[in-house]
Image (spheres, rainbow, N blue to C red):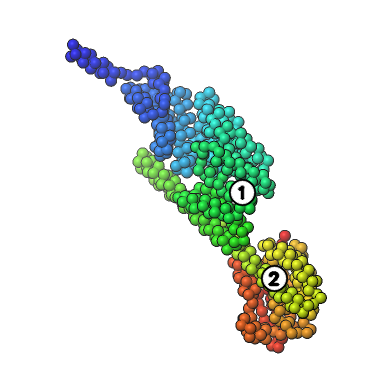
Amino acid sequence: MKRILLIFLSIGNLVAQEQIYTQSQIDSFDVYPTTRENILVYKNMLETNENLIGWEYYYAKMSRLYLSEQVYDSCYFYSKKTIDSYNSSEKKRAFDEKKLIVAYYNGARALRLHYKDYSKSLKYLLSCLDLMNKYPNFVVYMRGYVLKEIASNHMEMGDESMALKYLLQVSNDSLYLKNPKNYSPLYNQIGILYFNKNEIDSAKYFYRKALKDTIKNRRVSAHNNLGDLYRSINLIDSCVYHYKLSKEYLSKYSTKGLLLNTKYFAESNYNYVKLHDGKIIESIKGLESLLDTINNFEKFNKEEKTLKLGTLDYLIEAYQKNNQLNNALKVSKRKNDFLEEFHQQVLDENLRDLNIAYEVKEKDKSIQQLETTTEEQSEVIKQRNFISLILGGLLLSMSGIGFLVFRQRRLENKYETANLEQRLLRSQLNPHFVFNALNTVSSLANKKSENTSSYITKLSSLIRLILKNSREEFVSLEDELTSIEDYLELQSNFSQKFKYQIVIKDDIDKEETYIPPMFIQPFIENAIEHGLRGVDDGNINIDIRINETDTLLECKITDNGIGVVKAAEFKSKNGVGYESYSGKILKERLQIYSRSLNKKAKYTIQPLTKEKGTEVNVLLPYVLE
């Protein structure tokens, strides 16, 4: 009995193995879910009859499978197989053409994410969109995803206007927005693009829409973005409010599903809140700790670059508020070094992507050569040479563009570093000036002079003006001359008697001409303190004009004092060289301006005659407002 049963089972298996499926059975088979097992069942069905049509569905499903596994080269291979299979088939059915929609979409994602071929990815997506318009009732849920992918390609290519156009279309797709994961990322991205265009009201509108996300922890990004927006228009209270909410949502709700960078942005911004609340030391510690984490990133994308630069800027501001200008300067140099590394990384990636594209084109041509006749091979070789020239030109162009961008960034950051160095040196000039002024006060007090109180009042007014000017990178010539005249008046009336005269050429607009502050006064101070010492009929002349040759503002300071030689001898007896402490600082400042502005800023000191008199010629950079 058992033997008979085995015979029947064997016959049944043979019949099953030899079953031939009909086209109707093939067309009605649904590979769902998309697993290797289900796809293999469909493939086995197709292979029972060579006349069956449906390989497009098999290839499309394979591309979908590899896309989900992030094996992008295989995904693209099967996407292309789907398209080639349909194009080469003799019988073209609408049923099979619809399958190309999925294939084009999958291939486009592989081309963008893996090959970085954004132009070809866009072609795939536009073909996908054309087919969706042709078959409007097929996979309607995909339209929003296709439009979003088109926007992503435009973003990668740097065309934010086109990216915004397609994202706005996505925002009208109710099926796309039904997925809660799509809601706030879409509106945040639209808001960012409007913010980049400086359309603040539109950016605010979409950020606020992102705040309506039902998944509360996903509101973190929207609060970060609103904080950035309000900080950009100097509404600091509103900025701090949203930064605090961002941190609150991050702490209160689960961070599951949040991108790591979102958390880091919230942490960075919350340290800005601490800075605003006066918790400077706590803010510095938090920012340094966050930077230690960020520095462990293997590679930086644009978003991570923004994160690190923003955190470094906060740290610079924190050190400045804590009056640690040396540390602020060091952080500025770290920022400069990071930008150089980032732009080198971008340049290397661009060159690598061009080489990959070149190799892919070469492979395609090699295949074509094997399939063509000898006559056609000759033509292909000519085309290859032409393409090689184009790609070579592209490589050179990309290298040139990358170098220019890199050079521009480097110049910007060198200027920022120079700016901090200038502030550090200017901060050293202030106590130097105050020290000399206090010596005069002490002298008047010791003599019990009636002018002591009057001198202190005028001195405090002058110090306020000098402190105000010294905080600025450039001040108007009018403001600088006001402080100089106040200083000369103060010194000539209280310190020692002398006359002074300031002459400015008529072609100089004092209100429109801006110069670096605190350059002229120290030389005048030296002339009074050392040149006119012991001179009864002292006189100081100040002539200001534009040096057309070097495009610098020239300030000539002359006095009829004891002269350079005798002043040097006097100072040498007291153990000090002729070049004062302030003179060294000024020389350093002029060297920094010479480097950062590419101007030959300098000063010279020379005697008027062998016996007496000194001429100081100061050449300063200037800007016109």
Q: Where does the N terminus fall, quadrant-wise?
A: top left
Left-right relation of 294 to 455:
left
Residue, x 47% and y 33% (percent of image)?
104
The residue drawn where x is 57% and y is 35% is 216
Front residue of this view, candidates 208 and 35: 208
Position of 468 relative to 312 (above/below): below
Residue plotted at (60% across, 40% down): 222
- Residue behind mark 2: 434
Q: Are marks 2 and 1 in contact (CB under 8 Å)?
A: no
Dot 2 alpha-carbon crowd within 10 angstroms: few under 14, some 14 to 19, many 20 or more:
some
Where does residue 23 sit, x and y in percent of width and height? 38, 19
SS of the residue at dot 2?
helix
Q: Which mark is residue 273?
A: 1
User: Mark 1 belongs to which amino acid?
Assistant: Val
> SS for tag 1?
helix
Compared with residue 549, is residue 91 higher up or lower down, i.e. above or below? Answer: above
Towards the viewer: 433 or 614: 433
Residue extending farthest to the bottom is 611
Give me the C-alpha separation between circle 2 and circle 1.
35 Å
Question: Viewed as shown, does residue 359 lie left or right of 604?
Answer: left
Examine the rendering and report whether any part of residue 32 can be seen.
Answer: yes
Depth check: 19 or 430 in front?
430
Q: Where is residue 24 in the image (x, y as percent from the top left)?
A: 40, 18
Q: Where is residue 373 in the image (x, y as percent from the top left)?
A: 36, 40
Q: Residue 545 carries which label?
A: none
User: Along the horizontal axis of the image, is 246 left or right of 358?
Assistant: right
The image quadrant where one finds the C terminus is bottom right
In the picture as drawn, the residue positioned furthest to the top comes out as 1
Position of 157 relative to 178 (above/below): below
